[in-house]
Image: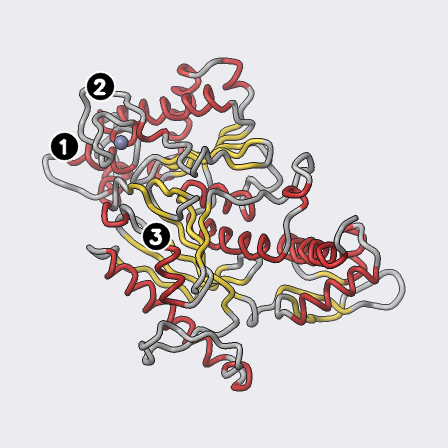
């Protein structure tokens, strides 16, 4: 016998996820789409409105009977923050709980030198964005008693209103999801050993969720991108480092503690250059955007960053250069490795070099085909990823909120295809 309270919560989650996927709708449409009775839908909708997750919208056109009132995801009473920590630039933004990122409420800043500075800058940006949003709220709501105070003793910082439900963080490197701790971040060493979700949770008084960046990309693509509805895909991220996320039978492969998928730290050149992980000749040192920038630097005899290297490529200065050929070869080796090991139905590849010139991706595929098992390559569709880590960070916190609301059907019945489940994330809240 299912606990009636749990059943109500599960129905509320189903209705909420329907709005997150499908946008504004009437009660009648939800009832048909979710196969729930009209009274059940009305009860779930009432609960979600009471909690500020849904709001009444305009009038629905209806070919049958009376026109109904549309319901939609609440615009100003349920928002989340997303944070992307990266080696060069960090990003903080806010979004609605359907993942719609606010155009105006987002900031980027150069990644600082130390961990305390990073926490301070994120806190500053979040507090200032919450402060601006607070001004837009009616006074009664802005001063609601359910306000949670920001860090004790920092009374100058604007308070974070109850409108913000949580914060998702995309973290580079190896994240132990059981401990919520960055084991090692080869391209951002000051994160080593730190528990960024827990530390930000204490400072901000918000539920904070950390996701390993490749898992964030996977989740973002699955919730808002081209992987919607896919239960079997892989995501290869070849930006600064080389990360991999794999979803198999609707579940992310996380390994024992969330460290699975570190393809970037497989040795491909036994005496190669030193990697940020301490090993030599890792795939990450030869197949990424940063490997390409390093090779271009060697070719032209002065250090250049990726934007300049890409500009040189696009202006024809690096045509048929060794820098490009070598990077394409190793990128193809990475693609072939994923195809041979995981046999994904779909593989997304994410990286700036691939977008610089349409022929590069085609050449990577041709080369990968030669290096993969024929049958596995033929079984796999390969696309350039359209999503980004920003969407992934937002998707992570939104899924965590849904999990806190009620277990998903997939959790209760693993044989049922569904919305995913935890993506190697670690959750921390303020005590
Ligand atoms: Zn390495």
Coloring scheme used:
secondary structure
Q: Which of 201 and 276 is in front in this view?
A: 201
Residue at mark 2 to residue at mark 3: CA–CA distance = 33 Å
Disc 2: which residue = 270
Mark 2 C-beta to ligand 1 under 8 Å: no
Which residue is located at x 33 percent, y 39 percent?
A: 239
Q: In this view, does 355 lie to the left or right of 346?
A: left
Q: Is residue 348 visible?
A: no
Q: Position of residue 246 (x, y in %)?
A: 49, 33
Residue 298, numbered circle? 1
Which residue is located at x 63 percent, y 69 percent?
A: 51
Q: Do the residues labelled 2 and 3 touch (CB within 8 Å)?
A: no
Tag 2, which secondary structure?
A: loop
Q: Is residue 405 left or right of residue 44?
A: left
Tag 1, which secondary structure?
A: helix
Q: Which of 384 and 402 is in front in this view?
A: 402
């Amino acid at each position: 016998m299912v606990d009636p309270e749990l059943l109500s919560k599960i129905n509320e989650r189903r209705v909420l996820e329907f709005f997150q996927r499908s946008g504004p709708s009437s009660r009648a449409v939800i009832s048909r789409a979710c196969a729930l009775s009209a009274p059940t839908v009305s009860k779930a909708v009432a609960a979600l409105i009471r909690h500020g997750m849904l709001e009444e919208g305009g009038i629905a056109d209806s070919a049958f009977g009376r026109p109904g009132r549309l319901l939609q995801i609440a615009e100003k009473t349920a928002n989340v923050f997303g944070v992307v920590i990266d080696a060069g630039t960090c990003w903080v933004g806010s979004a609605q709980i359907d993942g719609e990122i606010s155009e105006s409420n987002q900031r980027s800043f150069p990644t600082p030198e130390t961990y305390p500075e990073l926490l301070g800058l994120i806190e500053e940006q979040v507090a200032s964005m919450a402060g601006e949003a607070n001004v837009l709220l009616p006074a009664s709501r802005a001063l609601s008693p359910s306000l949670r105070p920001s860090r004790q003793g920092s009374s100058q910082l604007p308070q974070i209103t109850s409108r913000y439900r949580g914060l998702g963080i995309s973290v580079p490197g190896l994240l132990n999801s059981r401990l919520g701790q960055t084991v090692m971040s080869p391209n951002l060493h000051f994160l080593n050993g730190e528990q960024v979700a827990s530390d930000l949770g204490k400072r901000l008084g918000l539920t904070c969720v950390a996701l390993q960046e490749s898992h964030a990309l996977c989740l973002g693509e699955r919730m808002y991108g081209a992987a919607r509805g896919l239960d079997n895909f892989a995501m290869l991220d070849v930006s600064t480092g080389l990360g991999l996320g794999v979803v198999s039978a609707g579940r992310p492969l996380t390994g024992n503690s969330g460290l699975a998928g570190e393809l970037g730290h497989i040795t491909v050149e036994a005496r190669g250059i030193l990697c940020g992980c301490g090993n030599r000749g890792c795939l990450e040192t030869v197949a990424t955007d940063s490997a390409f920038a390093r090779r271009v630097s060697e070719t032209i005899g002065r250090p250049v960053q990726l934007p300049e290297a890409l500009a040189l490529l696009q202006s024809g200065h690096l045509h048929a250069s060794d820098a490009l050929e070598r990077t394409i070869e190793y990128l193809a080796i990475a693609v072939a490795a994923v195809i041979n090991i995981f046999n994904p139905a779909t593989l997304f590849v994410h990286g700036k070099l691939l977008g610089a010139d349409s022929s590069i991706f085609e050449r990577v595929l041709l080369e990968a085909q030669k290096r993969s098992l024929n049958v596995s390559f033929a079984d796999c569709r390969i696309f350039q990823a359209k999503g980004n880590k920003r969407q992934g960070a937002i998707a992570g916190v939104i899924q965590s909120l849904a999990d806190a609301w009620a277990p998903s059907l997939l959790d209760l019945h693993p044989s049922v295809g569904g919305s995913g489940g935890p993506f190697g994330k670690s959750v921390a809240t303020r005590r």
